[in-house]
Image (tube, rainbow, N blue to C red):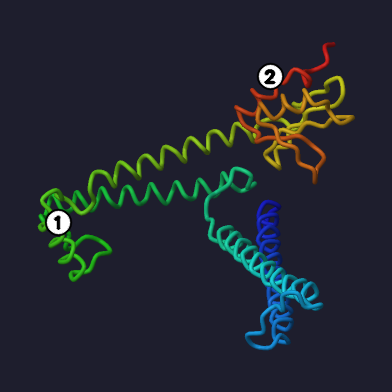
Amino acid sequence: MNSYEERKQARIDHYKNQATKATRRSNTLAKESSDMISVIPMGQPILIGHHSEKKDRNYRNRADNKMRKSVEESSKAEYYANKAEAAENNTAISSDDPEAITKLESQLVALEEHQNYMKQANAHYRKHGTIKGFDGINDEKAATIDEEIKSHSWARQPYASYSLKNNNANMRRIKQRIETLKKVRAIPEDSGWQFENGRVEMNVEANRIQIFFDNKPDEDTRKELKRWGFKWAPSMGVWQRHLNGNGLYAAKQVKSIQPIEK
């Protein structure tokens, strides 16, 4: 498991932990509220004007507040549980992943193989008028495919032209991502620069352009950084954004971090 996958798993574990804690708080608050209400006689109203009125109202309000907070904690638990599930099910390849290029290249190979398979299947059908006999398709499945083609007037082959076009578009998109990532990964770590009150670093491993200030930047500088897409990362003590062409361009536009002239 590389550093990116470790961070992803840590994020999932955090969401699950938060969901568990919120569920426990919700259950505890719900029980406390129920226990408080249970000591009030069934149907017992607040005795208006009685010396116990204020104390009774406060008691019931505390019970109600506990139940309201229990519902809030339950909603929070559901929110974090959904976040954990989404993170676990997310199979998209992030540019932050050190193995992104390798994974994208594997994905590209699979798409290319599928493209060739679809073309060969269509060629077989055009030649024989049936998909029967094509590699990997048994007679029963071939009969089903043949019938589906005949029953749709727009279908003239096993794989429609839009399937080939869509797959081809995905291949082009992945090729472009691979080329872009290779250019980014080729950026030297030491290609950053010093500016008057700090330094700019190219953190290739984290896939971030990072800005380190010697002191907290003034409000105008912070606004300028935000305007150019940089965000404050308190855990690292840096301003940063993704390391790519747009990020490099943005860094060169922020006046307060331009290189010291030699």
Q: Residue at x 66, y 24 (%)?
A: 250
Q: Position of residue 105 (x, y in %)?
A: 50, 46
Q: Residue at x 75, y 32 (%)?
A: 189
- The label on residue 149 is 1
Q: Position of residue 33 (x, y in %)?
A: 71, 77
Disc 1 to disc 2, C-alpha distance: 57 Å
**Callout 2: few (<14), some (14-19), or many (20+) C-alpha neighbours within 10 Å?**
some
Q: Residue furthest right?
A: 215
Direction from residue 207 to residue 217 in the image, left or right:
right
Mark in front: 1 vs 2: 2
Foreground residue, 206 or 105? 206
Report the amino acid beneath label 2: Gln
Foreground residue, 234 or 187? 234
Q: Indicate the secondary structure of the residue bearing disc 2.
A: loop
**Callout 1: few (<14), some (14-19), or many (20+) C-alpha neighbours within 10 Å?**
some
Task: Confirm or deny contact between disc 1 and disc 2 (CB under 8 A).
Answer: no
Q: Position of residue 116 (x, y in %)?
A: 31, 48
Q: Where 53 falls versus 161 (above or below)?
A: below
Report the amino acid beneath label 1: Ile
Residue designated by label 2: 253
Q: How many marks?
A: 2
Q: Residue furthest front?
A: 49
Which of the image's four quarters has the N terminus? bottom right
Q: Residue at x 83, y 23 (%)?
A: 194
Q: Indicate the secondary structure of the residue bearing disc 1.
A: helix
Q: Where 203 falls versus 94 (above or below)?
A: above
- The label on residue 138 is none
